[in-house]
Image (tube, rainbow, N blue to C red):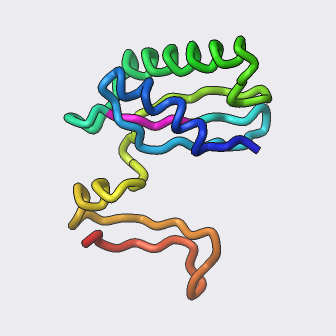
Amino acid sequence: MTDVAAIIDLIEPEADALGFELVRVQFMSGADEPTLQVMAERPETGQLNIDDCAALSRRISQKFDALEEEGRDPIDHGYRLEISSPGIDRPLTRAKDYANWSGQEARINLLEAVAGKKQLRGLLS
C-alpha cells in the first residue's frame, strides 16, 4: 500500500516551488493501473491552467525518477500520474476551503447511508 502522507511530503515542496498549493492528493485504484491524483491551485486565483499542470507533472516525475535511481522509489508499482485543478466540484479538504465557501451549498457524499440517504445537501456555515 502506498503511503500517501509520505508522497505529500515529497511533492509539496515541488508544488510550493511553482507557487501552487496542494488541495488533495490521493491514490485511486482503477481498472488498468492505479492513479496518483494530485489536485493543486494557485492560491491567488484558486485555479490551475494546463501549463501549470504540465509544469507540476514534470517536477513530480523528475523528483520520483531521481529517487528511483537512488533506490528509494516512493511508489513501487506502476501508476498513472494525474494533475488537475479542483474544478467546479472542488473538494473541501482544508479548513480555509470551508471558510472561503461559507454560505454556499455543499453536497456531501457518504460511504454509508444515514436515514436512508448517501448524499446530503446543505449550506456551509
- Secondary structure character of the magenta stretch overall: strand
Q: Which residues are magenta?
A: 37-41
Q: Is residue 38 left or right of residue 36?
A: left
How many badges with numbers are in the image?
Answer: 0
Rendered location of residue 94, percent (x, y):
37, 54
Asked where in the image residue 42 lies, by quadrant, the reply is top left
Q: Residue at x 67, y 43 (%)?
A: 3
* Quadrant that contains the N terminus: top right
Q: Is residue 53 left or right of residue 99?
A: right
Asked where in the image residue 95 lies, by quadrant, the reply is bottom left
Residue 38 lies in the magenta-colored region:
yes
Q: Is residue 7 above or below residue 96?
A: above
Rendered location of residue 125, percent (x, y):
25, 72
Q: Is residue 60 left or right of residue 100?
A: right
Instruction: Pick the residue in front: 115 or 27.
Output: 27
Rendered location of residue 37, percent (x, y):
57, 36
Q: Residue at x 46, y 16 (%)?
A: 54
Q: Residue at x 53, y 41 (%)?
A: 25
Residue 103 lies in the magenta-colored region:
no
Q: Is residue 38 above or below residue 59?
A: below
Rendered location of residue 5, percent (x, y):
58, 45
